[in-house]
Amino acid sequence: MARVEIKIGGFGGQGVILSGYIVGRAASIYDNKHSTMIQAFGPEARGSACSAQVIVSAEPIAYPYIVSPEIMIVMSQEAYTKFTPELASGGVLITEEELVQPHNLRKDVKHFSIPATRFAEELGKKLVVNIVMMGFLTAVTNVVGKKAMGQAVLASVPKGTEELNVKAFEKGYEYGVEVMAGGVPA
Amino acid sequence: MKADPKGVLTGSHFLDGDHSCSEGAIAAGCRFVAGYPITPSTEVVERIASRFPYVGGMFIQMEDEIASSIAIQGAVWGGKKAMTVTSGPGFSLMMEHIGLAAMTETPCVFVDVQRAGPSTGLPTQPAQGDMMQARWGSHGDYGIIALSPNSPQECFDLTIKAFNLSEQYRVPVMFMMDECVGHMTERVVIPPADQIEIVPRKFYEGPKADYLPYKTNGDLVPMMVKAGDGYNIHVTGLTHDERGYPSMTVPTQEKLIPRLVNKIKHNAPKIVEYVEDQVDGAEVVVVTFGITSRTSIPAIEQARKEGMKVGHLRLVVVWPFPEERIRELASRVRAFVVPELNLGQMVLEVERCVAGKARVELVGHPGGTVHNPKDIYNVIKKSAKG
């Protein structure tokens, strides 16, 4: 597997950084790959724009920053506007369906969307929106195996919340499988 | 001696460089940290503060960096292994006490997670602009050791090495990270405690009446005792005799200061550490350290693909500088290329050792981000053509 660059953008409080951490942890600890995560450091607080950059590769990673991401998850309109021009041609764009209006959607990328916040709310806690997104990412891309992602989610969430997070992960994954099978218009 | 298992989080972790440095310090036996948190080094002390209660350590958030850099030295004379953690602006404030640690031969570790300067500069962006300051920042003549990690794994491994070297030679050791390595998260494998080698402090155990704190036995490094154990000790920044008492005379100065310099200079062949890749037979050698070692790799690989003979020499220990090796290579290679996240610091050492026998090209960068590998590639290409 060649170097795959992933960018996750949203606003502070959505678990953007934790999402990047989970993908990297899944790849490097549970999937026998290499991974480097860089956080966009700024005076980020809840509600302002933030992003995580993750590289996953079968080979050791030299250059640590992403150059042209092949996979992008955007969870806010601001992140959509700001980041989507960086997405590589032929790349995968995943958007939060109810938070992002894909204006002037690029024709050269594969677009998937999921109402992850609504699903999280239906499960009882909006906070697990990022974990729903992780399930969806796992289903629509093959960047990290499902088992590894599941293990990384379990290892990364607070004690006592495992059951809720596993449900959130499964919900996102199942929706992704459905979308891939053509059951849901993307 | 092996590490105390109580402080060792054996296993595979997904950690950033700052947190990994903290784990390395704890594994090395560090049980006292004083610091004044500053970006991008804050996560080091955050983790220390949360982990120390479980391993019997003490963390103090001090009023400033000057106080931090002296508090650790008090702890060391009380028998602890200690470090302080900062970034450029704080490192500048610590210079006086780095000199004191060198003069009093107090083993301790100074972590500098470098950000772009000068002054407050760019708090959340990387640079490697403190490399000369690490070596020469305090006044007078002295020797120190500096290491430069390029990954979170090395932040763990080399922090242990930093403590070991500080104990072995009784010098302050500078741990020269940068924002990119500090805030980069990767897999870090922490081995079992019984696979981690720890250099214990050399304590004097002879008769109390005979102890002379600054008397050496041939190896240039005197033995310590713990303050409060009943030995007569005196620790001062003034020029001192074997008893540690001020003796402000030329003969005392002539005896003490060359020893402070020579304990590093004479042991340099044992201390230097570098990693070479295809250096033998190379026409161009790229000399790197820390994060530039990683941003140079795509450039080196591209040049090799195009048939250029490019070697890579990465400094792991930056100070003392591997003078002998660079001199040896200078007579065989066409050029040295030195990328660094500053406008020309370690390149001066390369130039000094090359002494005109080959071309030396700096790929400077004022910091704020890392090099674009293309910029390094262009200089390699130009140098390969001669």
Image (cartoon, coloured by chain):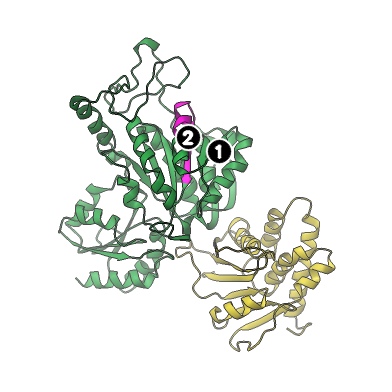
Which residue appears at 37% of the width and 32% of the height? B168
Which image quarter is the C terminus of chain A in?
A: bottom right
Report in which chain the residue with disc 1 lies.
Answer: B
Up-down: is A116 above or below B64?
below
Q: Amino acid at mark 2?
A: Ala
Check if mark 2 and mark 1 are on a common chain.
Answer: yes
Count of marks overlaid on the render: 2
Which tag, 2 or 1, sits closer to the chain's start?
A: 1
Q: Which residue is mark 1?
A: B60
Task: Tell me the colour chain A is drawn in.
Answer: yellow
Provide residue B183's location: percent of width, then percent of height: 52, 57
Q: Amino acid at mark 1?
A: Ile
The green-coloured chain is labelled B
Provide residue B135's location: percent of width, then percent of height: 31, 46
Report in which chain the residue with disc 2 lies.
Answer: B
Which of the 4 quarters of the picture holds residue B312?
Answer: bottom left
Local secondary structure at mark 1: strand
- Answer whether residue B81 is magenta in the image: yes
Q: CA distance from mark 2 to mark 1?
A: 9 Å
Up-down: is B199 above or below B281?
above
Which of the 4 quarters of the picture holds residue B205?
Answer: top left
Question: What numbered label is drawn on residue B71?
Answer: 2
Decide: marks 2, 1 in contact (CB < 8 A)?
A: yes
Which residue appears at 77% of the width and 60% of the height? A165
